[in-house]
Amino acid sequence: MRILHPAVSKWCLPTRGRRFLFLAAAGVVALLPAFEAARLATAITLGASTDPAQLQRALVLDPADAGVEHRLGLTLFYSASGTPPERAQGLDHLRRATAYDPYEALYWSDLASACEASRDVSCADDAIKRALDSSPMTPRLYWSAANYSLRTGRQAQALVLFQRLLDLDPSYAEPVFRICLRMLGSPESAEQKILAENRNPHVAAAFLNLASGLGDDDSAYAEWQHVVSAGGAGLGTLSLAELEPYLDHLIDAGRQNDALTVWSDLERLGVVAPPDSGKRAESASYDGAAPAQLVFNGGFERNPLNAGLDWRYNPEPFVAVTLSDVASHGGSNSLQIEFTGDRNQEYEPVFEIVPVQPGRSYLLAGFVRSQAITSDTGPRLRVRDPACLPSSSSCLDASSADTISTTPWHPVGLSFTTGPGTRFVRLSIWRPRSRGYPAEISGMCWVDDVLIAEQPLEGALAPRR
């Protein structure tokens, strides 16, 4: 067998001079990577500057760096001096940045802005198109492109871009609608032009809040009906917080039927979970035929939503409000209120907005117990018309008897009649300032099975046997 051996070449360096030249050449070759690294490091350091001179030096070291070209172009074009030669140089550098890296959408977008500022419409149009082509899923680019179309008088094109923007990112809905309202003149037109192409529930929620806030309640409610009639697709992904401004507006505007419809739809679609059906105040706490209960979550079987037509907290110092699963009149929970400050002041730590009909008689009822309430003026159930001025003597404002000292569960309540314009009442747990002695309040009370129902009701306040 033939054995192969690698060829070996021998280089003879018989003289000292040749040996020195060889070592010098080897040293230069070895140092080349270090020199290159130093050059690049220097170029990067200079390229991070905002000084045009430093950026120019960076380009000398690395002539084809698109990032440095982009930075230098912006620095020159938008410099404080803003001379025509500087702006022209800046525009040239911005063009070179897109030439070196034609797939970077940011470079095209900034070039478009500079071209528009230079009144070069053809350049701006091309740059915007190239930006969208380079990054077709970036919402910010569609926002910029749509606004550019508006500035150049191309309304139809702007609407198409806004529609695509909302498809990509519904969080742009409010600013888009504000612009479209100025452009189209009315919420109804904006609904037809934008929402007809996009029934995303988050986009719809933004429109509802904006249109109702501008006083166009009919357009807002029409959009809600469109969303629900389309099957409520995606409405389950909404949060109550997104619709809270719209619900608050319906309450403030006295649109009782609309508020009830929206709230019922939210329950049906799962955005609002109904109170535990295992405990309803009308069946768990009162004798006789079950009345139509108007108080949402009157048995406190789940944490209040703090919005809409559920209980809301009104945080105040020296009052602690929690759900208690230790003491309840019926079911699992009750509302526990602890007065911790030993002070004489008015408290209204919890309230709920309840829809009612004008000119009707109602019963407000509930069950309370107390422990060591020190004041002669204790907590009460209160009902008043939130639309009335406090100074009006004819306004609905009534409250039950005080709960003081230590008492077991016992019923409290009152009858009231709504005014001719009353659409909602504010139901609350209220403690007025005391005018007697002892005035300061401390101690605890519990409230459960709160009910508002239209009268007549026979034996409604009779406790369970």
Image (cartoon, rainbow, N blue to C red):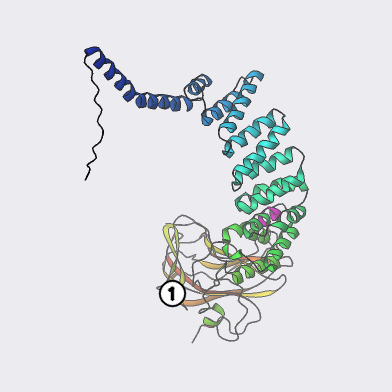
Q: Quadrant of residue 323?
A: bottom left
Magenta-span inclusion, residue 280: no
Query: Where is residue 341 drawn, in percent x and y?
Result: 42, 57
Q: Quadrant of residue 291?
A: bottom right
Query: Where is residue 46 drawn, in percent x and y?
Result: 46, 24
Query: Where is residue 409 drawn, in percent x and y?
Result: 46, 77
* SS assignment at label 1: strand
Against 285, residue 316 (above or below) is above
From the viewer's perspective, is 184 left or right of 285? right
Residue 387 in sight from this viewpoint: no
The magenta-colored residue range is 208-212
Magenta-span inclusion, residue 211: yes
Please state the total of marks drawn on the protein image.
1
Residue 104 in sight from this viewpoint: yes
Against 166, residue 356 (above or below) is below
Residue at (30% x, 21% y) in the render: 27
Task: Return the residue nearer the eye: 345 or 424.
Answer: 424
User: Circle 1 is placed at which residue position?
Assistant: 407
Residue at (44% x, 71% y) in the render: 370
Query: Where is residue 350 drawn, in percent x and y?
Result: 53, 63
